[in-house]
């Protein structure tokens, strides 16, 4: 399975994986739960146009369903009176909207220059190797881990920096991988 | 207006023009991809690079608003080098598939590669592929191949800004950016094939034209769409008597750069080869026999004369009922009027128009304009003096159709100049009403229920085989030219009527459509003072004054370089 | 060692305090004093928007986001009320900190979010803004949560909302989270993104100050810039000007030092502090190794050799004089063990990944450069590759694209290959590329290249 929008950087240059799939279907029609709906209504009060609420609304959708499916795009487009194609274009422009389900722990390894200088590429490769020779963006069979490569996380003083889901992890060197991975249940 | 100097030449352009338009107004060709005169400016392709005096950096001319006194240098070494660079970048990932690409020959990438590109390729990297996004239908008419896409976004802007339907979007970003629809939603709107028109390369092509003909073999003939009364200017593109496609012909006053899918793809009908032959009913039989034009027209004359004489005898009007058609040219309808009403005195020809589905097209002047009739020329019929039939108006046709006249007053002769004047001509009950006439004479392009019931069938030519003028909804007189000579057994409606009139020595059989046009001008409203060859009638965009040039020059299939031909086949001998 | 002496921290003065992000501790430390002062004097006319703008102008504050444009002057580009009519003015705080090596804004927001908010409030006053947005990059999830809490607290205390502190003025602040796109740090791309679109930089003109977000006059300021505004209002422009190397480079500055140093981190120093002082602050090169190269302003800046950076005053003009730029002051230190071609390849990968894809030269050029560099470091380089790389880079920037992303993308390639060519050549020399002998005929390639290069740079 692909890692959705977080298509690994190394996979892209020279060997693009884009075009693998369009918006995947989740197989059911979607609508926000009451709480999310309330958050969405609040969002609308913060912007002069409905369109401006698109990015935050997509965040709500990702919070609710874990990833942005074809049906989520259609639903958000209807909510904000946009064309589904436009919404899809926005989803695919930004890297943080998952376009396929990801593992329980989405491990995002920064490989930008400061982390690169501190051995981030090795960490990334080793991390995938330890989790069962995962391909970039692949999820483990038990659905627990997805490993992807990301650009600078603005923690360059803590290189190599890793983000797991929304949480920052500092100085994850190759030696620390065992305890780091062990800490992810 | 702003005075702008381009490569030493001073031109005046409107204040809202940009530097690219100023260059084109000055006759300086600046290559471009993403600029389109009817779409918003995005400045993305970086092909139209020029230098502007006082600005240190090179500029994409389409993004530079003109100001009075601006000096543009469009042909400097720096500008040319910048275009070299852009061409090189565009070509490193473009497939070398021109030999199998339908756009080849009218491809901006080819043109600009030759005109502004480097003579060598310096890349040795593998070319970008879009697996799964090549050669894929993305709508009922359009096929997309993203390996060829140069990311100019014209198609996206077309769907957002012209049709407002927004089916297309950029997907992904950076070097992987491509154009697609949202999963499960097709590029399906009433103007969808125009997205392929605006595509400067072969990334979007139409299913109907794909792999049918290399474009450089195509002869182009000016014509007007006969799908509705909007009268979109179009170009019939044909070769060896086959119409391969029709394209919108730029006409700022009507259809601008656009044409609806219905109008564009109905042209396939022009290629129907099931032409009819002149036939007359065998006396006292149910069968018709094939005959020659001479005999057929003689029989028509006899039938009409008999009816006229009867009319004198029983002093009853309506013994000859003539039906014109909004699908025929004004010239043809006027001939009906002048022959039957003015000369033979058998009453005013009538016509009916079907309501059609609502069609629409957009231009810059009027915004959306709508067509509701299923024929192009009801205005022309009225101008020529025909009477528009409306149910309940008590006219001869109305009486006939309302079954009130199943009596001696039913016409002795019903002369129908277009067997397909209404959709109901295939409806047997309707045909039975018409069949109340003693003699039923029709001009017909193809067989239908009405031709089956007719006593005399006079085969007529399709739109691609005739010339004349239509009057569109806005009252514009627009000319169509002959693209393809029909087979000798078929005549245009104009020829049929001239030869029929010749039987009484009432009409000059040597006349052409132009002669008819010039003879009827004085008496037909809207035609006064128009010249057959004038730009207005032909549909050439307004003559190019520097000031106006920017508006009409940014054409993708430039009308000033487009060669519109007369028929390429020698006219067959049509003497009967 | 030469250069300016270290200063008492200003922007980072509350670093290390317990619970420094809470509004209570911020108020204890005298926070929101300027906001109260300005609003309190607004009715009497003691404080006017023009006065605030003049103070900022007088301070010489230059934008801390990267370009170093004078902040006060940027504010004056907003058309006056009679010209802009009913259109509201918007202030956008650019917290889309994505330049690799930059982590100062993150620190400011994490450690002292109210400092940022107060800066936004004061700028909003100066610009007559009713609604300001803070665009934070998507990756900083917890920072965004923290900011949202800070905003809620500020509303609760009456520093935001309707009729703020009884001044009759309204001010709203909304935290808007991005979703992962470096280009959204470019101000017009940020505007597009805030409008809910793909982050494509816009063509200028019109400039944002005239027509920005929702076609209204818009000012985009960096987090650190706005924090400086607060301190200028606290202590006055003269104090601000007293810090810094010269009239044109004033105030305290946050330097982000990462890479091969003993103590990577954010350091506050006068703008224009010498390189050597900074390096000493960060504990020197890691392991006592020799310095090889320094990227002074994030990968968008040309890299400098150890010799070039020696004693360099680290401010906008000082670094520019060395033909690089201070940018966001993301200083990446590379020691003697650094494999420069690999570092350049890593940077090229970053730019290929982050190009927005609208302009041809950047969309096609950045991946092309990355492909070639990757091939070279993978041992498949060709003889002609290095010159070709320089030529490609030469035809991407300098106005060839809408925004300056392409200029940023070529800087590391141009500087890396020019300054460390022998390292690249060593890779090529070991190449086992099958086409090695089939390199394009030199005369033809060069001819084309000369024409291209000469043309663009003439």
Image: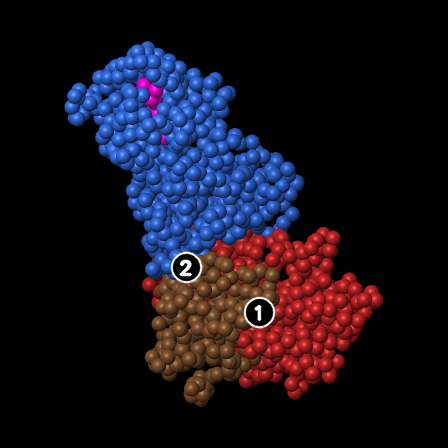
- Residue B483 in the image, given as x and y percentages of width and height: 34, 30
Q: Indicate which label's residue lies in the foreground, 1 or 2.
A: 1
Q: In percent of the image, x 54 and y 71: which residue is there?
A: A38
In the displayed structure, C260 sits above or below B164; it is below
- Residue C246 in the image, given as x and y percentages of width and height: 74, 69
Q: Is residue B470 left or right of residue B457?
A: right
Q: Is residue B307 magenta?
A: no
Residue range (magenta): B318-327
Q: Which color is chain B depicted in? A: blue
Q: Which mark is residue A9?
A: none
Query: Label 2, on which residue?
Result: B182
Query: Label 1, on which residue?
Result: A42
- Residue B177 in the image, given as x and y percentages of width and height: 44, 59
Report which quarter residue C36 is drawn in: bottom right
Q: Is residue B321 magenta?
A: yes
Q: Which quarter shows the C terminus of chain B?
A: top left
Around disc 2, counting alpha carbons within 10 Å, would you say few (fewer than 14), some (14 to 19), or many (20 or more)?
many
Q: Is residue C275 left or right of residue A100?
A: right
Q: Which quarter shows the N terminus of chain B?
A: top right
Q: In percent of the image, x 55 and y 85: which residue is there?
A: C287
């Amino acid at each position: 399975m692909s890692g959705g929008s977080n298509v690994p950087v190394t996979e892209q240059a020279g060997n693009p994986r884009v075009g693998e799939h369009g918006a995947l279907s989740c197989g059911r029609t979607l609508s926000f739960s009451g709480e999310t709906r309330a958050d969405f209504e609040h969002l609308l009060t913060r912007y002069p146009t409905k369109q401006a609420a698109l990015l935050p609304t997509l965040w709500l959708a990702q919070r609710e369903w874990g990833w942005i499916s074809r049906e989520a795009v259609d639903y958000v487009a209807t909510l904000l009176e946009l064309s589904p194609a436009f919404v899809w274009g926005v989803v695919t422009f930004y890297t943080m909207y998952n376009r396929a389900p990801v593992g329980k722990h989405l491990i995002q390894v920064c490989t930008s220059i400061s982390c690169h200088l501190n051995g981030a590429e090795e960490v990334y490769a080793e991390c995938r190797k330890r989790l069962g020779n995962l391909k970039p963006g692949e999820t483990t069979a038990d659905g627990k881990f997805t490993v992807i490569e990301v650009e600078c996380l603005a923690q360059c003083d803590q290189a190599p920096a890793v983000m797991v889901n929304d949480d920052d992890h500092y100085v994850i060197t190759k030696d620390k991988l065992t305890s780091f991975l062990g800490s992810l249940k | 207006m702003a005075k702008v100097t381009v490569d030493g030449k001073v031109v005046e352009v409107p204040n809202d023009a940009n530097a690219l338009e100023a260059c084109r107004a000055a006759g300086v060709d600046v290559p471009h991809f993403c600029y389109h005169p009817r779409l918003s400016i995005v400045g993305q392709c970086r092909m139209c690079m020029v230098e502007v005096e006082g600005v240190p950096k090179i500029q994409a001319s389409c993004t530079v608003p003109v100001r009075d006194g601006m000096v543009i240098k469009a042909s400097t070494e720096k500008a040319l080098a910048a275009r070299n660079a852009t061409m090189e970048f565009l070509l490193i990932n473009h497939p070398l598939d021109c030999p199998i690409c339908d756009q080849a020959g009218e491809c901006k990438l080819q043109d600009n590669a030759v005109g502004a590109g480097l003579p060598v390729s310096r890349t040795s990297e593998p070319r970008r592929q879009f697996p799964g996004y090549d050669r894929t239908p993305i709508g009922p008419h359009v096929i997309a191949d993203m390996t060829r896409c140069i990311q100019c976004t014209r198609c996206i802007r077309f769907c957002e800004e012209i049709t407002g339907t927004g089916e297309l979007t950029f997907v992904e970003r950076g070097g992987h950016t491509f154009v697609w629809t949202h999963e499960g939603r097709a590029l399906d709107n009433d103007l969808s094939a125009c997205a392929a028109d605006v595509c400067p390369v072969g990334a979007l092509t139409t299913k109907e034209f794909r792999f049918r003909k290399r474009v450089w073999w195509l002869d182009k003939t000016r014509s007007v769409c006969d799908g509705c009364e909007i009268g979109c200017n179009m170009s019939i593109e044909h070769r060896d008597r086959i119409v391969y496609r029709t394209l919108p012909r730029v006409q700022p006053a009507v259809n601008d750069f656009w044409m609806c899918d219905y109008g564009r793809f109905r042209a396939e009908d022009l290629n129907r080869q099931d032409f009819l032959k002149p036939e007359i009913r065998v006396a006292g039989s149910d069968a018709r026999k094939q005959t020659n034009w001479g005999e057929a027209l003689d029989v028509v004359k006899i039938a009409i004369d008999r009816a006229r004489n009867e009319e004198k005898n029983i002093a009853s009007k309506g013994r000859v009922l003539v039906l014109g058609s909004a699908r025929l040219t004004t010239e043809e309808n006027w001939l009906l009027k002048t022959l039957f009403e003015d000369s033979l005195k058998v009453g005013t020809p009538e016509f009916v128009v079907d309501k059609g589905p609502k069609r629409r097209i957009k231009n810059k002047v009027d915004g959306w304009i709508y067509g509701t009739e299923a024929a192009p020329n009801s205005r022309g019929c009225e101008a020529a003096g025909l009477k528009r039939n409306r149910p309940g108006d008590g006219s001869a046709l109305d009486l006939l159709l309302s079954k009130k006249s199943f009596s001696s007053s039913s016409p002795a002769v019903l002369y129908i100049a277009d067997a397909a004047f209404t959709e109901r001509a295939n409806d047997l009950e309707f045909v039975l009403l018409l069949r109340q006439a003693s003699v039923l004479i029709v001009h017909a392009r193809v067989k239908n229920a009405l031709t089956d019931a007719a006593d005399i069938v006079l085969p007529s030519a399709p739109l691609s085989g005739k010339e004349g003028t239509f009057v569109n909804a806005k009252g514009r007189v627009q000319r169509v030219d002959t693209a393809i000579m029909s087979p000798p057994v078929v005549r245009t409606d104009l020829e049929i009527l001239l030869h029929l009139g010749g039987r009484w020595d009432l009409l000059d059989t040597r006349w052409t459509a132009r002669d008819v046009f010039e003879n009827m001008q004085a008496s037909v409203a809207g035609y006064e003072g128009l010249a057959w060859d004038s730009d207005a009638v032909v549909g050439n965009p307004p003559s190019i004054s520097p000031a106006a040039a920017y508006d009409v020059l940014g054409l993708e299939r430039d009308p000033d370089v487009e060669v519109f031909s007369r028929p390429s086949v020698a006219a067959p001998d049509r003497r009967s | 060692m030469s250069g300016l002496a270290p200063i008492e921290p200003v922007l980072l003065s509350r670093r290390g305090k317990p619970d420094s992000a809470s509004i209570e501790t911020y108020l204890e430390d005298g926070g929101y004093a300027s906001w109260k002062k300005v609003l309190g004097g607004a009715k009497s006319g003691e404080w006017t928007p023009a006065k605030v703008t003049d103070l900022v102008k007088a301070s010489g504050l230059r934008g801390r986001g990267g370009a170093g444009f004078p902040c006060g002057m940027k504010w004056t580009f907003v058309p006056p009320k009679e010209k802009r009519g009913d259109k509201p003015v918007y202030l956008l705080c650019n917290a889309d900190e994505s330049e690799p090596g930059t982590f100062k804004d993150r620190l400011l927001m994490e450690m002292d979010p109210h400092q940022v908010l107060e800066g936004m409030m004061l700028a909003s006053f100066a610009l007559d803004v009713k609604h300001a947005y803070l665009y934070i990059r998507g990756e900083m999830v917890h920072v965004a949560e923290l900011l949202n809490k800070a905003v809620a607290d500020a509303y609760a205390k009456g520093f935001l909302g309707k009729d703020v502190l009884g001044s009759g003025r309204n001010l709203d602040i909304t935290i808007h989270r991005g979703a992962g796109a470096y280009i959204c740090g470019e101000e017009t791309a940020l505007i597009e993104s805030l409008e809910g679109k793909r982050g494509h930089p816009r063509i200028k003109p019109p400039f944002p100050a005239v027509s920005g977000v929702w076609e209204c006059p818009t000012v985009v300021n960096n987090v650190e810039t706005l924090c400086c505004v607060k301190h200028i209002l606290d202590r006055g422009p003269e104090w601000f000007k007293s810090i810094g190397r010269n009239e044109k480079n004033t105030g305290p500055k946050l330097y982000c030092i990462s890479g091969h140093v003993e103590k990577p981190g954010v350091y506050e120093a006068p703008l224009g502090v010498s390189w050597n002082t900074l390096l000493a602050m960060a504990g020197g090169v890691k392991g006592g190794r020799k310095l090889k190269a320094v990227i002074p302003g994030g990968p968008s800046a040309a890299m400098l050799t150890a010799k070039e950076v020696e004693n360099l005053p680290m401010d906008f003009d000082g670094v520019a004089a060395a033909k690089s730029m201070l940018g966001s002051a993301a200083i990446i230190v590379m020691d003697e063990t650094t494999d420069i071609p690999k570092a350049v390849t890593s940077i090229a990968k970053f730019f290929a990944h982050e190009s927005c894809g609208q302009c041809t030269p950047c969309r096609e050029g950045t991946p092309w450069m990355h492909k070639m560099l990757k091939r070279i470091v993978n041992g498949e380089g060709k003889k002609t590759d290095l010159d070709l790389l320089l030529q490609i880079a030469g035809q991407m920037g300098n106005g060839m694209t809408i925004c300056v992303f392409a200029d940023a993308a070529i800087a590391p390639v141009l500087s890396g290959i020019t300054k460390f060519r022998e390292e690249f050549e060593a890779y090529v020399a070991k190449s086992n590329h099958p086409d090695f002998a089939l390199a394009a005929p030199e005369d033809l390639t060069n001819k084309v290249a000369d024409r291209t290069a000469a043309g663009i740079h003439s």
